[in-house]
Image (cartoon, helix red, strand yellow):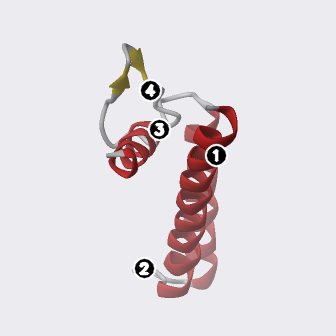
């Protein structure tokens, strides 16, 4: 099923599981040193600094909501790009 493939490719891209299709290994964009890994580390460092500035010891619900919702926006965009790529570039 195509939708399952979209999910498998996305999960491989974000490093949840390895996946290959037609003999091509899907790249983990979050491998150590890659741009997504570096950006995620930067976000994490900013989160820690903000938590320290706010004097918070536990996770801040609003900050976690922002991070998780932005990740979900990225997932929705990735799925849409995949589907458009299949239709338009096929």
According to the picture, the residue beneath numbered tag 1 turns out to be: 39
Crowding at mark 2 (Cα within 10 Å: few <14, some 14-19, many 20+):
few
* CA gap, disc 4 and disc 3: 7 Å
Q: Earlier in the sequence, mark 4 or mark 3?
A: 3
- Mark 1–mark 4 CB contact (< 8 Å): no
Q: Earlier in the sequence, mark 1 or mark 2?
A: 1
User: Which quadrant of the structure image shows residue 10?
Assistant: top left
Whether residue 57 sits left or right of residue 29 in the image: it is left
Q: Earlier in the sequence, mark 1 or mark 4?
A: 4
According to the picture, the residue beneath numbered tag 2 turns out to be: 57
Give x and y (percent) for residue 17: 30, 37
7 to 53, vertically: above or below: above
According to the picture, the residue beneath numbered tag 3 turns out to be: 13
Look at the numbered disc 3 and give the secondary structure of its residue: helix
Whether residue 75 sits left or right of residue 87 in the image: it is left
Residue 26 marker? 4
* CA gap, disc 4 and disc 2: 38 Å
* Between marks 1 and 4 in the image, the one whose residue lies nearer the viewer: 4
Give x and y (percent) for residue 28: 46, 31
* CA gap, disc 3 and disc 2: 32 Å
* CA gap, disc 1 and disc 3: 15 Å
* CA gap, disc 1 and disc 2: 23 Å
Q: Quadrant of the C terminus?
A: top right
Look at the numbered disc 1 and give the secondary structure of its residue: helix
Instruction: Tell me the residue at 50%/37% (across/down).
Output: 30
Q: Residue furthest top?
A: 23
């Amino acid at each position: 099923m195509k939708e399952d493939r979209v999910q498998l490719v996305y999960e491989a891209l974000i490093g949840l599981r390895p996946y290959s299709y037609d003999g091509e290994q899907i790249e983990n964009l979050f491998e150590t040193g890659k741009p997504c890994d570096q950006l995620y580390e930067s976000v994490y460092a900013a989160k820690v600094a903000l938590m320290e500035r706010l004097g918070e010891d536990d996770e801040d619900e609003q900050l976690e909501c922002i991070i998780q919702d932005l990740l979900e926006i990225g997932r929705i965009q990735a799925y849409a790009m995949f589907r458009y790529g299949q239709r338009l570039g096929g």
